[in-house]
Image (cartoon, grey):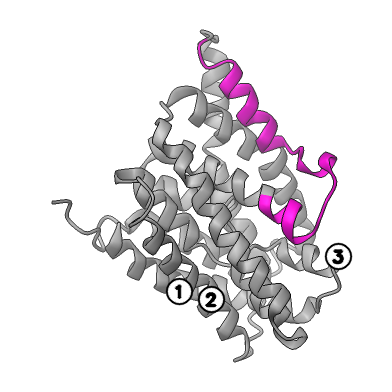
Amino acid sequence: MKQPIGLAEMSPVFTLVLIVVIGILLRRLRVLSLQDATSIRKFVFNVALPALTFISLYSNPIPLKALWLIPGVIVIQVVGYLTFRLAPVRYRETVFSGFLGNTGFMGYPVVQAILGQGALPLAVIYEQTHSFMVFSTWIHKNLRSFINPPLVAMLLALILKRVALPQFFTDACQLVGNSTSPLAMLFVGLNVDLDFNWRALIAAGIKLALIPAMALALTLVLPVAGDIRSAFIIQSAMPTMAASVVYGAEIGLDVQKLSRNVVVSTLLFPLTILFWARFL
C-alpha cells in the first residue's frame, strides 16, 4: 500500500509557497511592481509554459488511461456551470470563482513538485480540458480563443514525439521550461492583495474543499490510479484562477468580489493542499 505523503514529501510545495511570499514582499517593498508582474506573466504564458508543456509531453510517456481525466474535468465543470445558471444572481461570483481553477500557472508547478516531471503530461491534459470548458461553456468564446501557446506546444509535442530532435533544442526547452515554477509563483505573489472578506471564504470553500472532494469521488468511478489519480486530485485542489477576474468581467460579474475570491483562495491553498495530499 502506498504510504501517504507527509511533510517531507511536501517540501517542494513549501518552496513554491516561499516564492509566493517573496513576491508579496518584493511588491510591498516596491522592488517589483504590477507592471513587472505583467511582463513576467507574458513570458511565462508565451515562452516558459509552452516550453515546459512541449518537453514534458515529448520526453515522457502518456498513458492511455490518462484520457479518463477529460471526462472527469468535464463532469466537474458541467456541474459548476449548471449550478451557476440556477443560483441566485447574488451568488454567481461565488460559484464562478469556486469552479475555475489555477491549473496552469499553479497547477503545473505543484504537480511537478509533488509527483515529479514525469507527471506533467497529466497536468497538461487536465489544464487543456479545463481551459476548453472555460472558453466553450462559461464565457462562450469563439474558436480562435482556444488557440494559445501552451496548446500549440502540446500539439507540436504530440506530432514530433517520434522524431529525434537535436539535444541542444530539447535542452533549451528544458532550461526555459524550468523557469516556469519560480516565475509563476513570483507572479502569484506580486498579484496578491491582502484584502480579506469573509464572504470570499464561501468561494474558497467550494474551490479548495468541494471541487477536490468531487474529484476524489470521481476517482472511485473512473478507471484511474497512481499518478493519474493523484494529478486529478491535485489539479482539482488548485485555488481560483487569477484570470477568472477578467473572464468574469466579460460576462458582467463583479470584479471586486472576484478579485477577493482569488486572493483568499490563494492564501488558504497552502493549508488545504496539505490535507488533500493525504489522499494521493
Q: Residue at x 25, y 58 (%)?
A: 5
3D distance between C-alphas at marks 2 and 3: 22 Å
Q: Quadrant of the C terminus?
A: bottom left
How many marks on residues? 3
- Residue found 62% across the figure and 84% down from its top: 200
Q: Is residue 167 magenta?
A: no
Disc 1 versus disc 2: distance between alpha carbons?
Answer: 6 Å
Q: Secondary structure at mark 3?
A: helix
Judge the density around disc 2: few (<14), some (14-19), many (≥20) Cα neighbours within 10 Å.
Answer: many
The numbered dot on residue 206 is 2
Labels 2 & 3 near each other (Cβ < 8 A): no
In depth, the one of 131 and 195 nearer the eye is 131
Q: Earlier in the sequence, mark 2 or mark 3?
A: 2
| Tag 1: amino acid | Ala
Q: Which residue is mark 1?
A: 209
Residue found 63% across the figure and 63% down from its top = 100
The magenta span reads: 133-162
The three-letter amino acid code for the residue at tag 3 is: Glu
Say few, some or many: other residues with alpha carbon within 10 Å of mark 1 (under 14 / 14 to 19 / 20 or more): some
Which residue matches tag 3?
Answer: 250
Residue type of the residue flagged with mark 2: Ile
How far separated are the C-alphas under marks 1 and 3? 27 Å
Answer with left or right where residue 193 lies relative to residue 18: right
| Residue 170 relative to residue 272: left or right | right
